Image: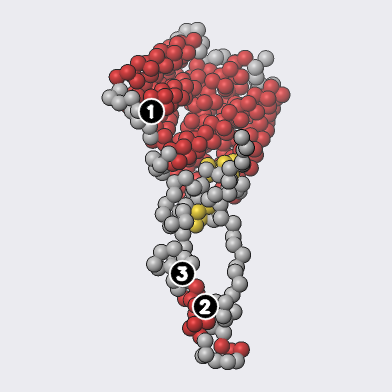
Amino acid sequence: MSYSRPDETWGYEPPEAPGAAEGAAWGDAWGDAYAGAADGPDAAPSRAERRRAANAPTPGRSGATGAHPQNTGSYRTTGADGKEDHTLPPPSPALLHRLPPLAITIIISAGLVLGTQMERPVYAAGIAVLQLATVGLMTWVRKIDGAWVPLAIASGLAIAADAAAVAWTPVSLVPITVLLALAFGAAVAAQLVRRTHIGVTENLGFTMLLCVAACGYACYIALSRLGSAPPAMYSAVVAAGTAILAARAVDLVMPDPRINRQVTRGAFGIVIGTMCGTASAAYAGLVIEGPEPSHAAIGGLLIALTAVLADLACGYVSAARRIDGAGTAPNTVVNVAGPLLAFAVAGPVVYLLSAYYMID
C-alpha cells in the first residue's frame, strides 16, 4: 500500500503571473475598443479608460457580471464554481474584531489582581460573572446538540465551587475537586434524559471542558485566601495576561504565517506571547516581595504557555464548527471567548505553582 501526501495547497491561491497578451498590448477589451482608432503611438487609452475596461466582463471570470470569486488576501472563500465553500481557510478578521480580546484581557487581569483586596463574597461575585460569561460564550462558539446540558451543569457548578472556595476551612482544592467529580457524573446522567442522543460523546466532552473552566476560576478565590500566596498569584496573573496580550498584539501586525491554515491566528504571536509572559513573570518576581525571581520565571513560562494555548484552542473550536458546515459564531464572540477560556484553564496551574513552587 502506498501513501501519498495530501494536497495542502487547496484553498491557497498565490498571485498568478500575467498571461501572454493577445492582439493589442493592453488586452482584448481595450484592443477591441480602440482598434483602428489611430495608428500612431498616441492611441494608448487613458487611465480611466483602462480602469473601465478592466472591470468589463470577460469569459474567464465567474458570474455574468464579470466578478472574480471572493478573495481576501491569499485565502479565498469560494470554490471554482463561485459558491461559498466552508472547508476553505477563512480570511483574517477585520481589525475592529481583533481589538476586543485585548480589552477583555486587561480587564480580567486587573480584576483578578485588584479583586483580592476586596471582601471575599464581592470577589466571588466578580469571578461568577467571568464563569458564566465563559460558559455562555464557549457554548455559542461551539454550538452543539443539547446545549442545555453544558449550560445548566457548568453554571450550577460555578456557583457551588465559588461558595466552597469562599467558605471552606482550611483552604483547599478538595471541595472543588469533589464538586467537579459530581458534575462529571451529572453530565453522564444528563445524556440519558436528552430527547435525542445525537452527538453524545461531543456533548459529554464539551460539558466536562466547561466544568473544568468553571472550577479553574474558583481556584483564584481559594488562592486569594492563602496568606503568602497572593504575591505569587500576582506574578502568575501578570504572566498569563502579558502572554495573551502580546500574542494578540503580534497577530494584529503579523497574522501570517498561521499556526494552522484553518485558524486565524499567527504563529509568531504564539511564540512571542509565551516569551513575553515568561519575561514579565521574572520581572514581577523582582519587584514584588515574595516570589523568587528564578521560580517566578519558570512558573511564568508554564502559566504563559498554558494561557496562550488555551486561547488558541478557542480558534480550533470555532474552526471545527465551521468545517462541519454548522456556520460560525461572530468573530467578536470567538475572540472574546479565547481570553476567558485561557484564564479559566490557567487557574489550577496558577494555584499549584503559586502555593507550592513560586513561594519558598
Q: Amino acid at mark 3?
A: Pro
Q: Nearer the viewer, residue 313 or 76?
A: 76
**Residue closer to the observer: 340 or 162:** 340
Q: Secondary structure at mark 3?
A: loop
- Residue 117 visible: no
Residues tagged 3 and 1 counted as in contact (Cβ below 8 A):
no
Where in the figure is residue 192, as x and y percent of width and height?
A: 32, 18
- Which residue is located at x 41 percent, y 64 percent? 63
Q: Which residue is mark 3?
A: 59
**CA–CA distance in space, label 3 to label 1:** 46 Å
Give residue 199's mark. 1
The residue to which callout 2 is attached is 28
User: Residue shown at 62%/38% (left/top)?
Assistant: 3
Q: Earlier in the sequence, mark 2 or mark 3?
A: 2
Q: Is residue 282 visible?
A: yes
- Residue at 47% x, 45% y is 87
